[in-house]
Image (spheres, rainbow, N blue to C red):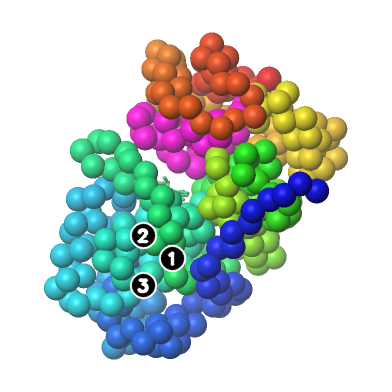
């Protein structure tokens, strides 16, 4: 085995069912007295539950978390942080809410307790994407990482089946790219394999029963592991294309990951010789090809398969390829413009990956 470096994620993780009830102890034992609770307008009920659990230690609910972390919203929240002398942040929600918690935390140094309720995995990364005047920028800084992450399986049962499917595939994408990342290592590969297997088993069961406890448990566990892969390795073509389509064309995050994944992995298979077989072993159905296994999984999940379904124009393919090729990045297979245009065209049309 060759030499490798593994850096452990320092966050404290509480995982299980009903773990939200530990929030008051978590805030108290760390000595905090004024927590601001962050959420989107759709998860105010969850935030109110936390407010109730925290009692006098809850200072304020800020319910304006927004996709892509606009700095105007962060600044609004920061004014309240100062005004109310907030000493702790509790974010509850998906990647958008986690992003707001990270954005406040990096500017103030305030401790961030993150309660993820989707499978996006942002809570395990030191990456923060923000938008200002229509421009999306990304920073990577260890201080962005939440201090404590509370995974409560029960909170994910309200995530609609469709969003669970795309969010779960978003998570699988992190682990799939970690399998061939230039800075991958045997520990991360173990985590990636376990994460893919858990999610691929759980997602079809969630489609049948959105509140299945076992499936939700397995999916959130898998999402945690996949998030660790995202936070520990360098992502390649797949994440680069999704970032371009989300950042420059406003395509929805998890849905875009879901459409592109078979295409980007199929593109990389010739240069990542073990990838197809490894995926085939991890995905259900016993297919001899991993790409085939992934396609069948997506069929089972009944997700949209074409970028044109999200109003992405065929005319924009060329510009998207140009943006995605602006900066060099690590990828197993050489990224060639014409081939990327063809990949995007197939994904736009909803044709099978090749
Ligand atoms: P999201 O956070 O935008 O959530 C989508 C919607 O689902 C929101 O309205 C939210 O309130 C609702 N929701 C979340 N959990 C729910 C639940 N359990 N029940 C009912 N409704 C629920 O979506 P997302 O896909 O989790 O996150 C996408 C954002 O996260 C993007 O902006 C993306 O760039 C970012 N992201 C960042 C990183 C990172 O490492 N920085 C990683 C992944 C995603």
Is the shortest distance between ligand 1 and the CB of mark 2 under 8 Å?
A: yes
Q: Identify which residue, 105 or 4, lies in the foreground.
A: 4
Q: Earlier in the sequence, mark 2 or mark 3?
A: 2
For the stretch drawn in magenta, what is the main secondary structure? helix
> Rounded to the nearest whole Å, what is the CA distance between mark 1 and mark 2?
7 Å
**Residue at screen point 37% across, 47% down:** 139
Mark 2 = which residue?
102
Q: Earlier in the sequence, mark 1 or mark 3?
A: 3
Residue contact between numbered discs 2 and 3, judged by CB atoms under 8 Å? no
Residue contact between numbered discs 1 and 3, judged by CB atoms under 8 Å? no
Whether residue 219 is visible, yes or no, is no
Mark 3 = which residue?
111
Is the shortest distance between ligand 1 and the CB of mark 1 under 8 Å?
A: no
Local crowd size for mark 1, using a 10 Å CA cut-off: few (<14), some (14–19), many (≥20): many
> Rounded to the nearest whole Å, what is the CA distance between mark 2 and mark 3?
10 Å
**Residue at screen point 61% across, 73% down:** 16
Q: Which mark is residue 146?
A: 1
Residue contact between numbered discs 1 and 2, judged by CB atoms under 8 Å? yes
């Amino acid at each position: 085995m060759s030499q490798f470096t593994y850096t452990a994620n320092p966050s404290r993780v509480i995982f299980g069912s009903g773990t939200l009830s530990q929030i008051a102890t978590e805030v108290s034992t760390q000595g905090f007295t004024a927590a601001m609770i962050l959420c989107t307008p759709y998860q105010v009920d969850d935030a109110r539950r936390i407010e109730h659990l925290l009692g006098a230690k809850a200072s304020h609910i800020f319910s304006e978390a927004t996709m892509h972390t606009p700095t105007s919203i962060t600044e609004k929240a920061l004014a309240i942080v100062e005004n109310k002398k907030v000493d702790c942040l509790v974010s509850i929600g998906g990647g958008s809410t986690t992003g707001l918690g990270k954005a406040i935390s990096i500017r103030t140094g305030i401790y961030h307790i993150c309660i993820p309720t989707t499978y996006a995995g942002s809570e395990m990364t030191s990456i923060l994407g923000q938008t200002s005047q229509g421009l999306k920028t990304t920073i990577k800084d260890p201080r962005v990482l939440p201090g404590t992450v509370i995974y409560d399986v029960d909170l994910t049962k309200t995530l609609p089946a469709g969003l669970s499917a795309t969010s779960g595939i978003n998570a699988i994408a992190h682990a799939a790219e970690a399998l061939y990342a230039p800075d991958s290592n045997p520990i991360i590969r173990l985590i990636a394999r376990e994460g893919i297997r858990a999610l691929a088993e759980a997602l079809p069961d969630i489609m049948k029963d959105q509140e299945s406890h076992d499936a939700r448990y397995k999916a959130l566990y898998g999402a945690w592991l996949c998030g660790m892969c995202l936070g520990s390795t360098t992502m390649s073509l797949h994440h680069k294309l999704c970032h371009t389509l989300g950042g420059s064309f406003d395509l929805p995050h998890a849905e875009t990951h879901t459409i592109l994944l078979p295409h980007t992995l199929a593109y990389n298979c010739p240069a990542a010789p073990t990838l197809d077989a490894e995926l085939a072993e991890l995905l259900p159905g016993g297919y001899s090809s991993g790409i085939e296994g992934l396609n069948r999984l997506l069929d089972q999940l009944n997700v949209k398969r074409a970028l044109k379904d999200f109003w992405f124009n065929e005319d924009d393919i060329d510009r998207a390829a140009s943006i995605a090729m602006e900066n060099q990045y690590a990828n197993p297979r050489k990224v060639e413009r014409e081939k990327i245009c063809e990949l995007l065209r197939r994904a736009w049309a909803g044709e099978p990956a090749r």
